[in-house]
Structures are given as C-alpha cells and as structure tokens.
Amino acid sequence: MKMSRTRAAVGSILALALLASALIVPNLATAETPGAIPGEAKTVIEIKMEGKKMGFFGPATVHEGEELEVVNDTMPSMTGPHTFSLVTKGSLPKTPKARQTCFTPGKICMGIAKWYGLKGKESPKNPLVKAGKEGWDTMGTATKKGDSYFFGKKGESIDQKVTAKAGTTLYFICAVHAFMQGSIKVLPPVVY
Ligand SMILES: [Cu+2]
C-alpha cells in the first residue's frame, strides 16, 4: 500500500513537471532571437531634464536582440510631447540654423510627422511607426519611414527588441525638439 502511494505521488510530480515544461517550451520556441533569454537584459533610454538640459540619456551600446526601452520622464504640459525616431546620420540637423528649420518641408522633423500621416504638429492617433522588420532597426529620412514612437504622457514607455544588425549605429532624434539627438551602437548578440 505504502509503495503504491509513493509511486502515485512520483507519478503526479512527473505529470506536473511535464505540464510545466509544456507550458515553458512554447515561449522559448517563439523567442525571436535564438540564444537570448527573453526579458533577461534590457537597455533603457530616458527622456529627461538634467539641470536645464533636456535630452535622451542612456548607454552608448546595446546588444542585437536585446530589449530597448525608451521612457519619458518629462511633463508634456511643461516640455511638450516628444518622439524617439530612428533617422539616418545624414538626416540629423547639425547646426543651430538647421535645428531651427527642422520642422519645415523637406527636413527631417516634418518628415517624421509625415511618417505618422500628419500635416502639422498635431498628435498622432497611433504613437508607433513601424518600418522594416519588427523592433528597432530602420532609420528613416525626410521622405522614407523609420521606426518611431510618440510620447504624449509622463511615464509613458515603449519597449521593443533591437533587430538592427550588430555593427550598426542607430541615430535618433525628437521631431518636436530637434536638439534632442543621440545614437546607440549595436553590439553582437549576447549568447546565454
Ligand atoms: Cu522632445
């Protein structure tokens, strides 16, 4: 009697273990980056004020396949909204004059508004513009869509995988504040 009860207990533990693995395996199978454990590593870029300087603050590098989160820590009623928009290096306005005229026809800030299907500085209905593959990978120009997110609220964040190839440097800008610019270099994927 005692023996059979133990066997039954072992059997049910095995059944639970099998059930647990059945529940876990499909998640691993759908992971986009083989070798990377989803949720294991996350890189964060913050939109915030440091003293009087408003900008993007984050690390210089991120690994291919890693989650890259961008979070807005500013108050839109004070600063206005922001975008985190991937753009080609050549699209970035470099001089004060180029930044002042960024939101004019043919320039990148107005170009980003057009990615959203907007004519002016109104807020988009859908905050996310997807270009190329899923995740952060495509840098746009004044005439070609790139990946972008529009932040209309404090505390709002967007979290996507970096799908750009290792060796790429992703450049980004805020279409509302052309002086908000940055870049992050994509390193080879981490193998766990
Ligand atoms: Cu901004």
Image: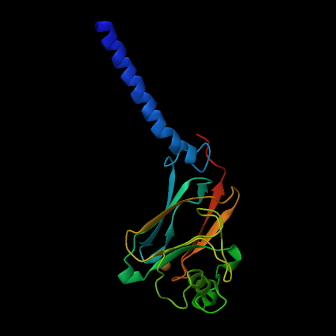
Q: Please state the horizontal and vertical placement of residue 2, each as a whole percent of the image.
A: 28, 8
Q: Is residue 167 left or right of residue 12?
A: right
Which quadrant, please, contains the N terminus? top left
* Residue furthest left as drawn: 1
Q: Quadrant of the C terminus?
A: top right
Residue depicted at x 66% and y 67%:
132
Q: Is residue 7 left or right of residue 1?
A: right
Identify the residue shown where x is 69% and y is 61%.
Answer: 168
In the rendered image, residue 20, in percent from the top left (x then y), is placed at: 43, 34
Along the line of sight, the residue nearer the viewer: 66 or 169: 66
35 or 86, nearer to the observer: 35
Q: Is residue 70 left or right of residue 133?
A: left
Residue 146 drawn at (x, y percent) = 63, 73
> Would you say 59 lies left or right of 64 here?
left
State the image quarter where residue 164 is shown.
Answer: bottom right
Q: How is the image coloured?
A: rainbow
Based on the displayed image, in which of its 4 quarters is residue 52 positioned? bottom left
The image quarter in which residue 179 lies = bottom right
Q: Residue at x 38, y 68 (%)?
A: 155
